[in-house]
Image (spheres, rainbow, N blue to C red):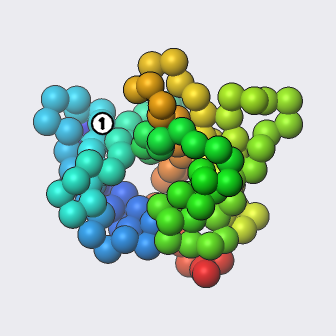
Amino acid sequence: MIEQAELDQLTKYLCDLFGESGLAVLTHPEEEDQALVVLERNFFGRITRDEDEGEISYDFSRDIPDAPHDELDAALKDLFNNDNVQLRKRPNKSDSAEIYRGEEFLGVLYDDEGSIEGMQVFNMAILEIDLDDGLDSVERA
């Protein structure tokens, strides 16, 4: 189960990451290992908690409308409120791309057979250390 302290830490982390003070991470009404991310009461994404050998991590995911590379790059800059965000093609992979802010790897955007038609999935790992350290060392635009 995701505890309130974790929800608070995740909220702060994601608010900083996305530059959105209106983000909130809330308990999922049906799944105890999941949380919902909302932006001003609208669904923004989902978080899944994983614990392996005492180490806790979180998986943030969000559907992104499929579009040509340049449009996706612009949409991600808008999503993160940061012009330093880049969508980079992956070598030898045509079904996914990597997302960076400056030189910091954020996550992967990929086609998922289980997602809604015309959508891709943005997936980002959040480690306990990310929540402890915050974004103090992250380059800001």
- Of 127 and 120, the residue lying toward us: 120
**Which residue is located at x 69 percent, y 28 percent?**
95
Horizontal relation, residue 107 to residue 104: left or right? left
Name above or below for residue 119 compared with residue 44.
above
The amino acid beneath tag 1 is Gln
- Of 132 and 80, the residue lying toward us: 80
Which element carries disc 1, helix, strand or loop? strand
- Of 103 and 39, the residue lying toward us: 39
The x, y position of residue 33, in whole percent, is: 30, 33
Residue 140, quarter of picture? bottom right
**Which residue is located at x 33 percent, y 51 percent?**
44
Residue 103, quarter of picture? bottom right
Other-residue count near label 1 (Cα within 10 Å), few / some / many at <14 / 14–19 / ≥20? many
Quadrant location of the C terminus? bottom right
Quadrant location of the N terminus? top left
Horizontal relation, residue 46 to residue 51: left or right? left
Q: Residue furthest left?
A: 29
The x, y position of residue 133, in whole percent, is: 53, 68
**Which residue is located at x 52 percent, y 50 percent?**
127
The x, y position of residue 111, in whole percent, is: 58, 28
Q: Residue furthest right?
A: 91
**Which residue is located at x 36 percent, y 58 percent?**
10
Q: Does any portion of residue 133 appear in the rendered image?
A: no
Residue 58, quarter of picture? top left
Residue that mark 1 sits on: 34
